[in-house]
Image: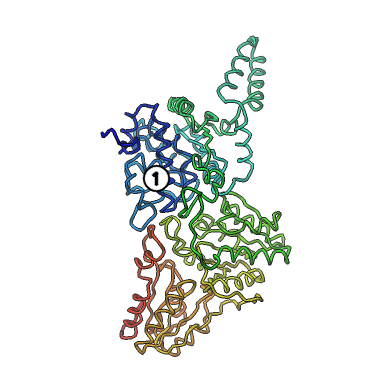
Amino acid sequence: MGENLMLIDQIKNPQDLKKMPKENFPILAEEMRNFLIKKLAVTGGHLSSNLGVVELTIMLHYLFNSPTDKLIWDVGHQAYIHKILTGRMDQFDTLRQYKGLCGFPKRSESIHDVWETGHSSTSLSAAMGMAKARDLKGEKHHVVAIIGDGALTGGMALEALNHIGHEQTRVIVILNDNEMSIAPNVGALHNYLGKIRTANRYKKAKEDIESLLKKIPAIGDGLAKTAERIKDTMKYFLVPGMLFEEFGFTYLGPVNGHDYDDLESSLRQAKKIDGPVLVHVITKKGKGYHAAESDSDAFHGAGPYKVESGEFIKKAGPPTYQSIFASCLTDLAERDPRIVAITPAMTSGSGLKVFGDRLPDRLMDVGIAEQHATTMAGGLAIAGMKPVVAIYSTFLQRAYDQVIHDICRQNLNVFFAIDRAGLVGADGETHQGVFDMAFMRVVPNTVLMMPKDENELRHMIYTGIQYNDGPIAVRYPRGNGAGVPLDSELKEIPIGSWEVLRAGSDAVILSMGPLLEVAMAAAERLSEQDIEVRVVNARFIKPLDEKMLTEIAHEGLPIITFEEGSLLGGFGSSVLEYYMSQSVYGMKIKNMGIPDRFIEHGSVKELLNEVGLTVDQLMEEVKGLIASKEVYS
């Protein structure tokens, strides 16, 4: 290897790291941090969480033998160093770009990515499955799950923790405790970990207890039982990590996650334990970059920024849907004491910080606990409150049973604000919000709407607050609105009503949300070819505007449904189902939407082009439909 190469350039796989003298690790860590800070300033990405796990990741790959030993990263926000150490450093210019390096672990990228994830709290269950398979096959390798303290509060993680401890399965859990998930963590477990951070080292306290007990003379069974009770009692007072011990884990820590000697001794000890072990590692989110250390929340999922100052490079534009939602809801809540806002660890992302600043008692951040958030909202609704659950589309999937069983079945007045609806871009497959229309519309008692712009969003928020006949939801995209003027007065929108945005007698496009802009552009260009297309804002996905659908059928106009959601079971499917239920046959209908596959990362524009939701493709489909004598389905 060339003498002028930096240490980071010398590592093409974990075996190269193992050959490196340990005294070089601090230099390597600094190079890795500088590399990430420079690269993510251009591409954006999860900066602060990755800066915090540099030393931990180095020691994991130094002491374990990936991919024989399984390293399972929870969420994946902290896997960039892992990607560098496993030969993907030269791909970081393409991070989260179209056809480029994924921002999360991805099995097709590397044999070292043994588990794919983008949602939190899955690593322990996956680890249990892999460890059980190992044991059944008579293999001996290690299974290591690396989970953050925020993700550990997820119900699924606690379920797995309980099972692993009960079965006494040989699994190593690395609890990366940086006191943060995306926003500051909340809850009793977070407070418990805080107490551990300030306690003495576990091993020292345990040794002191055992030494003390050995000095007690063994006089009969009674004294032995008394000694055991004394030991148990003293452990609760003196030994951190007792919660995990009660789950059946051997607890090691707290460990300084930036100290190589501390990490090495604890991880080597963990490898020797025949049973479940939890290594509690304390790290600093954003370590090594002042801007990220001082505001790790902002740099969790950062856009491009200036390296020297940490200032984000923002393009001027209209207010975001998130800010419009939050400001409108806050204004309404100040006039209506029934309104409460609930978020599963997404206060900043949902824009609800303004709500919390003005009405702190009525903002409830439950942590990474989407199921709890949903059912708690049901309890609030039964007690006469008006709960608004602000949740990303991709995370609402995690609470689907609660939506069906606890909210819709009881027909409770819960308002879901479904953020990040549609394609979200750089976060890719795990975060695209393309399934909520399909999975929400099939549930009885639901109302589902989507605004054409930020002004209509405000009216929909008002409509949702005024609605008292059961659950209602509004879905809206990530990012900036259309820049339209905002009405001074809010008004209710009649449930199930659509609006015609453009007249036309040759065909009809039914669409909603940002795709209406595409539909309008296609209609204008078709008009230049003497094809007049009606564009309808189908703002209620459920219930449909059956009156308008019947009128279109009587006119005999061909229809294109145009949605940024799953074709299977989506809005277009509901239109077909309606006409079939009314025995309306012979209509020409074409459904356009997201095909039956997972959509990877890239800009929203690139992804819309990939799936054919473009002006040109829509024009071609309209012309083909008008010319066709066949019935489309």
Identify the element where label 1 is drawn. Answer: loop
- Indicate how the structure is coloured in the image: rainbow
**Image position, residue 490 (x, y; %):** 65, 75
Residue 167 image offset from top left, x and y in percent:
48, 34
Q: Quadrant of residue 241?
A: top right
> Which is more toward the observer, 259 or 184?
259
- Left or right of 187, for residue 72: left
Mark 1 residue crowding within 10 angstroms, few (<14) / some (14–19) / many (20+): many
Q: Percent x, y for residue 80?
A: 41, 44
Percent across and percent down for residue 93 are 35, 51
Q: Quadrant of the C terminus?
A: bottom left
Does residue 38 appear to the left or right of 290 in the view shown?
Answer: left
One can see residue 408 in this view? no
Viewer-closest of 221 and 494: 494
The quarter holding residue 429 reads bottom left
- Compared with 456, 153 (above or below) is above
- Name the one closer to the observer, 308 or 577: 308
- At horizontal 62% and vertical 36% (from top left) the residue drawn is 194
The tally of labels here is 1
Position above or below: 622 against 169: below
Q: Residue at x 50, y 57 (%)?
A: 397
**In the rendered structure, which amino acid carries the disc numbered 1?**
Trp
Name, please, the residue furthest toward the front. 308
Question: Which of the 4 quarters of the picture holds residue 622?
Answer: bottom left
Identified at 73% across, 67% down, the residue is 335
Residue in the image at 41% along x and 83% along y: 524
On-image quarter of the N terminus: top left
Residue with the mark numbered 1: 115
